[in-house]
Image (cartoon, helix red, strand yellow):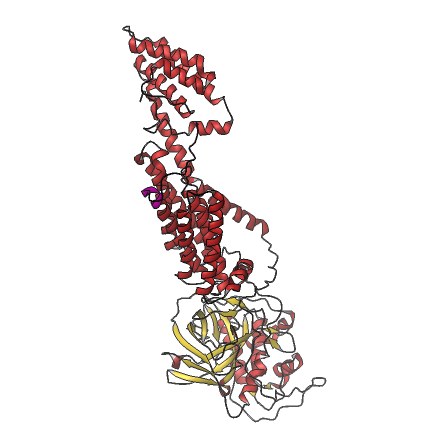
Amino acid sequence: MGDVELSSGPPLTNGRRIARALAVFAFAAGLAFSGARVVGTRFEPALFIPAGLAVLVGWLVCRRHVILRVSTQVAAFIVSGLAIAYVSGGTSNSFTRGLLDGPHQIITTAWPSPRFPTILVAIGALIFLATAISIDLAMRRRWRALPIAPMVVAMAALIAVGAPDGPQWQPVACAAVSAFVLLWIGLDDRVASIRSGVPVAISAGLAVLVVSLVVGVEASQRANPRHAEDANDQLTLVDPLSDVYSQKKVEPTVDVYSVQSAALAKLHLWRTAAVDVYNGESWSVSGRLIPVGNRLDVPTGADRVVVKVATKRADTGVWPVPGRLLRSSTPVEAGLGRRVISIIGDQRPVQSVFTVEPLTTFDPLSAASMPPAQPTDLESSYEQLARQYAPDGTVPEQVAALAKNLHDQYTLNPAAPGGVQITVIDTFLRNSKIGTEEQFLTGFVLLARSIGVDARIATGYKLETTQTNAPLTTGDAAAWAEVRVANGWAAVDGLIPDETSQTPPPAATGAADTPPAASPLDPPKVEQVDPNEPVDDSPPPESTTGWSGVRVWALRGGVFTGLLLWPLFVFAVVVSWKKLRRRKGLKAPDPARRVRTAWTLATDALVDAGASLQTSHTNAELVEAGVKTQPSAGPPLGRLQRHADAVTFATAECDLKRAADAVDQLRLVEASIRNSSSRWWRWKWWLSTRSLRRRTQSPLR
């Protein structure tokens, strides 16, 4: 292939060098856009700091020694990390903790990640490293397409941990333009002309485009390495159901929250917790809290409302939400099922703006389908009673029949013995049919679950107002039942009958009366998590489709690798096509043309092998120069030269025998060149474009 020049290259102000630097910055800007999606935003100015600084430093020191280049970029890396930490509201400690814990925080927090300084530092570090490597490669004359590789790897990583909501058009556009420019600029010394290199440049841009789209679409299907599953441990939350009735006893009432919305008159139920675990003694909330960013759920297409919520007490730990929470203006903590939305940090009072789909009321006519749930043994013990109350009809109709039966045939008496122990609930459902509100709710949920319906108890506040802003007080505390429908959860209305003072019968033998909670409790509080501490994720459940997952990731890896190699494949196809097209003269009907074509192709092969042939050389001097590079090609090359001289200078016509022998000698020359070195060298020789470039091509062209 000949010697490769390793000079420092053109000066900094060289137009092509500046263009390459700008192309790398365009790709880095795409990484910044993609990094913003990790924290649930479209634009994060802080992430452009590492992109711009890495390109600027790399461009300024590109002609220096490698040690100076590396040390300068390390210093710039520290500066950019500290800048991101301070711009995002952190400190110098956020920089070091971001490098150590930031990646773990990204993986262990539910998407989108909270906008913590440590997480932004980790994203900025990835952007800086990829950009620094790319700008250094782009400034070298030896490389053209290689600067694209680290940027594509970084973009794939950011897309994978970023938005699971479809392709990222801004990063993809920046990547495609950058890849096209990087290759197009360098094509003048890799292919014969810009025109012939345009397919290579276009293929590179399309490769980056398709790679980004494939990864983005896979991410939209939850191809995410995060493990934000529910844990088996319980949330550190005061018993929400008992807390409701404790708050009701507070005199005088105390404001807990203030809420504001243009649609406030339609928002009646404000959930603070969804209790779904019943152990025969009490209710609790399953899962655990992990930091979550600003997006919490996927819209279902229902109407949305915007509400502003502010805390009124210093010990309030959770947010009230009037339905399906889609977005929050501030990061929150939540479990996978969004059963509790916790306030992050200790600052009080605090306020946030939520975008929600209001909680709907269960309607058996509009509830076309209800996701099934597997009942426990305890819940299954009530199936016979549930079938007695709801013997036929669709599942939604059976749920409505259960609620109506409890409302019509059971009696609500707040003075009845309280508690939700299994013996008390069993007596309430099967014998006395007189109970408290919590027993009505517990009985309904157990009956609904026994027939395969996913049901739970929600606690929070019930608001009746016609204003656009109002307080949520302890007197508004309430609990209600919810069932899962196709688009989420719906509140069950018409379940609790009006109160009565009917005297309840004596409690069953062996079933101790449990008085209602007497001492008023504070609103539910949740143990706070340090935003800068990594979250220890629970081990994911064992998958029964392990090999299926392996096949999927193997397929993704194969597609990703294939698309990255696409530009190289197109490059090889273009070069091979041009060289094969030149060989058409070997089959020409004119024997003299076949000889001249064979001689020209032999000199092309020598040029690709590294020979330096001048236009002033005679045929004999061409052979001499070729033999210096490829000694084994001497005999067939000399014979081919004599055929060429005979065709050029002889007056007699060239016969077919001479033409056939010339073609045979060409094959011998090419075979001697192929066999003179390793297989890798043969590929480099065949794909060499020295014979295609005007500056280095054969003098016979």
Where the N terminus falls, by quadrant? Answer: top left
In the image, taking residue 442 as reference, residue 221 lies left or right, namely left
| Magenta span of residues | 1-19
Looking at the image, how many numbered discs can be counted on the residues? 0
> Where does residue 119 sit, x and y in percent of width and height?
50, 61
> Where does residue 567 sit, x and y in percent of width and height?
40, 39
Of all residues, the one furthest to the right in this rendering is: 510
Quadrant of the rendered structure where residue 639 is? Answer: top left
Residue under the image location 69 percent in, 84 percent down? 511
Quadrant of the rendered structure where residue 304 is? Answer: bottom left
Of all residues, the one furthest to the left in this rendering is: 651
Of 203 and 392, which appears nearest the observer? Answer: 203
Where the C terminus falls, by quadrant? Answer: top left
Residue 86 in sight from this viewpoint = yes
Image height of 241 relative to 131, above or below: below
Residue 393 in sight from this viewpoint = no
> Where does residue 565 sit, x and y in percent of width and height?
44, 40
Image height of 652 relative to 110, above or below: above
Image height of 643 relative to 397, above or below: above
Of all residues, the one furthest to the top in this rendering is: 652
Residue under the image location 41 percent in, 63 percent down? 41
* Magenta stretch: dominant secondary structure: loop
In the image, taking residue 56 as reference, residue 653 lies left or right, namely left
> Where does residue 141 sit, x and y in percent of width and height?
40, 38
Of 8 and 409, which appears nearest the observer? Answer: 8
In the image, taking residue 626 as reference, residue 652 lies left or right, namely left
Query: Does residue 59 show up magenta in the picture?
Result: no
Residue under the image location 41 percent in, 84 percent down? 470
